[in-house]
Amino acid sequence: MNNASSALKVAAGIFLTIALITIVVILFISAQEATKTAQNNFSDIQTELSQASFTVYDGTSISGSQVTNALRKFRDKDQFGILVKTGKNRGGQWYGNSLYIGNVADDKYGSVVDINNRVGDLRNTMIESSDEYVNPSGKFKASIIKDRSNVVRGLVFEQ
């Protein structure tokens, strides 16, 4: 009787241990799925926030002083370019990186022409005799350039 009782206690202990391990594994798998979902949601929010600073330039009309502020703010951003077209310089001048623009359907649209070649001198936007001069009270139409991955790669300001 003593042996049967001990055997039942051992069997019950083993059964409870297996049940506990099973519960822990199920909880761990559920937690992993919840963590993956949370990471994806966080990544989406992070992308939205990083792109939010450009929404003010999407199809809006801004002043020349806002153009020069944008140049100062974004000129050192990696893989990013700003094209400013003025009344004197209809072809425009790139600041930062030059980007491929033209046909939106082109695979290269919005990509950097040469990542190692940064162009444009911000000082020229302050010199009235320069073709690159940005009149602080002038009006510019602003637009954004996105690459094929829907990441903002540049801004265009056209007077």
Image (tube, helix red, strand yellow):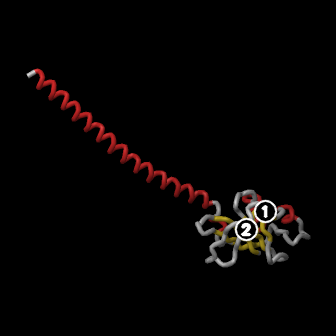
Residue name at image x 79 percent, y 73 percent: 92
- Secondary structure category for the residue under label 2: loop
Mark 2 Cα shell of 10 Å, populated few (<14), some (14-19), many (≥20): some
- Local crowd at mark 1 within 10 Å, few (<14), some, or many (≥20)? few
Q: Amino acid at mark 2?
A: Val
Q: Position of residue 5 (x, y in %)?
A: 12, 25
Q: Nearer the viewer, residue 72 or 92?
A: 92
Name the residue at 80% across, 70% down: 93
Task: Please identify the quarter of the rendering in which residue 52 is found.
Answer: bottom right
Residue hosting label 2: 113
Q: Could you tell me which quadrant the N terminus lies in? A: top left
Secondary structure type for disc 1: loop
Depth check: 138 or 105 in front? 105
Disc 1 residue type (three-letter)? Asn
Residue 18 as seen in the image, left or right of residue 112? left
- The residue at which mark 1 appears reads as 117
Asked if disc 1 and disc 2 are in contact, CB closer than 8 Å, the reply is: yes
Indicate whether 25 appears above or below 53.
above
The residue depicted at 78 percent of the width and 62 percent of the height is: 117
Corner quadrant of residue 55? bottom right
Residue at the outermost left position: 1
